[in-house]
Amino acid sequence: MSTSVQMPAPLVATTQFPITSRYNGIATATLQTPGGKPIIYLMRRFVPSPDRFALLQLHTVTQAERLDNIAAQYLGDPTAFWRICDANNAMRPDQLTETLGRQLRITLPEGIPLQTNA
């Protein structure tokens, strides 16, 4: 006969990451260990669907390119590489620059529509 220890449900709170962070708006949860020690962790962040991004242009990957340099070139911030990952539905940033000639989508931030002159 085995016994299982039931952990209490985690308490959830919002995070205070900067607006430019991929973790902005992602909640944290706190789990109490059986000994009473709180463990704070980030809730899961889902990669958004590529159709939530308005395409600005395409970038062709060349020899020895790095994603942070591409982000600096197009987005003005090397730490915004995650925006290029999201727009290209990539879980691993490295995969975006592994293949020479790959076309990367450079987009507006998620959910911002492309404005056209009517």
Image (tube, rainbow, N blue to C red):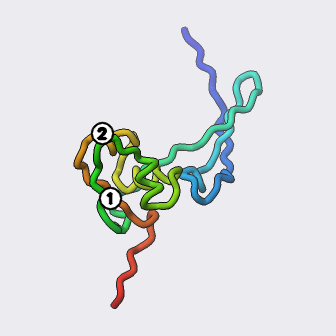
Q: Which of 76 and 31 is in front in this view?
A: 76
Q: In this view, does 7 lie to the left or right of 97?
A: right
Q: Nearer the viewer, mark 1 or mark 2?
A: 2
Residue 32 placement (x, y as % from top left): 71, 31
Total count of labels: 2
Instruction: Look at label 1 and name its amino acid.
Output: Arg
- Position of residue 67 relative to residue 111, above or below, is above
- Position of residue 63 relative to residue 20, above or below, is above
Q: Quadrant of the N terminus?
A: top right
As helix, strand or loop, the secondary structure at mark 2 comes to: loop
Q: Which of 7 and 12 is in front in this view?
A: 12
Q: In this view, does 100 lie to the left or right of 90?
A: left
Q: Nearer the viewer, residue 11 or 20?
A: 20
State how far apart marks 1 and 2 are (Cα): 15 Å
Q: Residues within 10 Å of mark 1 (few under 14, many from 20)?
A: many
As helix, strand or loop, the secondary structure at mark 1 comes to: strand
Residue sitting at 65 percent across and 52 percent down? Answer: 17
Instruction: Look at label 2 and name its amino acid.
Output: Glu
Return the residue at label 2. 98
Residue sitting at 66 percent across and 51 percent down? Answer: 15
Residue sitting at 41 percent across and 53 percent down? Answer: 70
Q: In this view, does 114 lie to the left or right of 16?
A: left
Return the residue at label 1. 105
Residue 34 placement (x, y as % from top left): 71, 23
Residue sitting at 52 percent across and 56 percent down? Answer: 77
- Position of residue 38 relative to residue 50, above or below, is above
